[in-house]
Amino acid sequence: MRISRHTTALTLGAVLSAMVVGGHAQAAAGDDETERAARWTELQQSIFGDRKVETGPALVTMDLPDRASDASLVPLTLTMPGKDKIQGLYLVIDDNPAPLAAHFVFGPAADPDTLKMRVRVNTYTNIHAVAETKDGRLVESAKFVKASGGCSAPMGMSDQEAMQGMGDMRMKFADSKPGKPIEATLMIRHPNFSGMQMNQVSRDYTPARYINKIAVTYGDKSVFTMDGDISISANPVINFAMLPEGKGPIKVVAGDNQGGRWEHSFDAPAASN
Amino acid sequence: MRRSPLALPLVALAALVLGAAAPADSPVNVPEPAGYWEGALNGYTPKTLAGAGLVDAAGLAALIAAEKPVLLDVSEADRRPPDMAPGRIWLPVHRDIPGSVWLPGAGEGVLSPALEAALTARITALTGGDRDRPVVAYCHPDCWGSWNLGKRLVRLGYRRVSWFPEGIEGWQDGREDGRDTATIRADAEWSAARKASAGR
């Protein structure tokens, strides 16, 4: 049954009038936006309590596909034009059942210009990035994304296979110039089981096992810490940057909710030119 | 309960392992099982449902406008992982086509006699027992649950059953055109029946 867009518009008009006439006020036009705003208000209360979250001018801009091809691996880039003012960042995927996906706190060795990661998106939702400034303000940015089923998507392999090499880490560095920030990509092997993934054969749920803490240091200074959750994709990949004047190795300590703890050190790259 | 395209091969494999009326390993030519689909509810579904009509999002909008059908969503509810740390914020939310009744789990291929009776009673109440009342079954895309419920409705003698395979996400694709969703709680009577059944 195909109906032209024009007819659809007419039909929708009819739907809306029918609903108003029928007294189904909860279904009137614009409720989607209203309800999403109400959801965000509820989440702010849960996450930030009585602290006020300001809207713009945004300190963070978010880049992600409008429609994600794989809801369990939605690439997200956070750019922070206001990086000098920012000390932390909350990432909230509004309609995920565990909405607070990550909380980053940047340390003195960080260059919080850009952060990239991959997240799970359960349903069509707003994503909020809330920057916490050094003077304690909270400033939000939002973007809508169309993706569905990311939290419950099975990994396409057995749990045992998915857990092989758990805790292995790699770090790649972009070419760095002397005196310029060092861009790094941290890759951690870990299934980050959400606890919402069902084994398609046994129909049992795989127990939740997710990375809940990552701490990165450069020498004796913190680059960032991240409190994570089930909304971070399997095999977490995080792009970040450090200030160049660090001394000593770059150390990563990661832990998960089942008591797993892994530590790796990487040599900082030698600057070329 | 939904899954990404990457998971499809696993689902197909699972179906083979189960050896039930196997669905094809591709989105085309999935045959209708003789009875209800009793395997995993995520997976490619047939393109047909004998005794019921298929409806797309635009068609459903027209149907809602013209006839106010009974809209039944059988999506499973998000379940808090028991091993998730207690302090974590867990606030699941479910959005539906406005005016729907949410019957989580009512699309299972196998229902206990008690649950089957509860579901039949609930459907009778919602339709006023009128077998000519249009009824729409849906959940998410690639979901056997709505197919099963559609089949159940046909077997119950409903003559105007529509199956909406695009589901909640298909409806929301028209968000810019005003296809709203509304947050909804699971149907109280159905949930009570499920709880009683689980406790037995």
Image: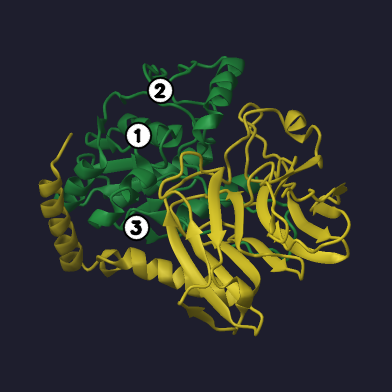
Which residue is nearer to you in this view: A41 or B73? A41
Q: Residue B20: image x %, image y %?
A: 54, 17
The chain identifier of the residue carrying mark 3 reads B
Crowding near pointer 1: few (<14 within 10 Å), some, many (20+)? many
**Marks 1/2: CA–CA distance:** 19 Å
Which residue is nearer to you in this view: A146 or A188? A188
Q: Residue B148: image x %, image y %?
A: 41, 32
Q: Earlier in the sequence, mark 1 or mark 2?
A: 2
**Which residue matches tag 3?**
B181
Q: Which chain gets the yellow colouring?
A: A
Q: Are marks 2 and 3 in contact (CB under 8 Å)?
A: no
Which residue is nearer to you in this view: B108 or B1? B1
Residue A209 in sight here: yes
The residue shown at (52%, 41%) is: B114
Crowding near pointer 3: few (<14 within 10 Å), some, many (20+)? many
The residue shown at (53%, 76%) is: A139
Amino acid at dot 2: Pro
**Marks 1/3: CA–CA distance:** 22 Å
The chain identifier of the residue carrying mark 2 reads B
Q: Earlier in the sequence, mark 1 or mark 3?
A: 1
Of discs 1 and 3, which sits in the foreground?
3
Q: Which quarter of the figure is the C terminus of chain B placed in?
A: top right
Relative to B9, residue A22 above or below: below
The chain identifier of the residue carrying mark 1 reads B
Residue B150, labelled with which disc? 1
**Marks 2/3: CA–CA distance:** 27 Å
Amino acid at dot 3: Thr
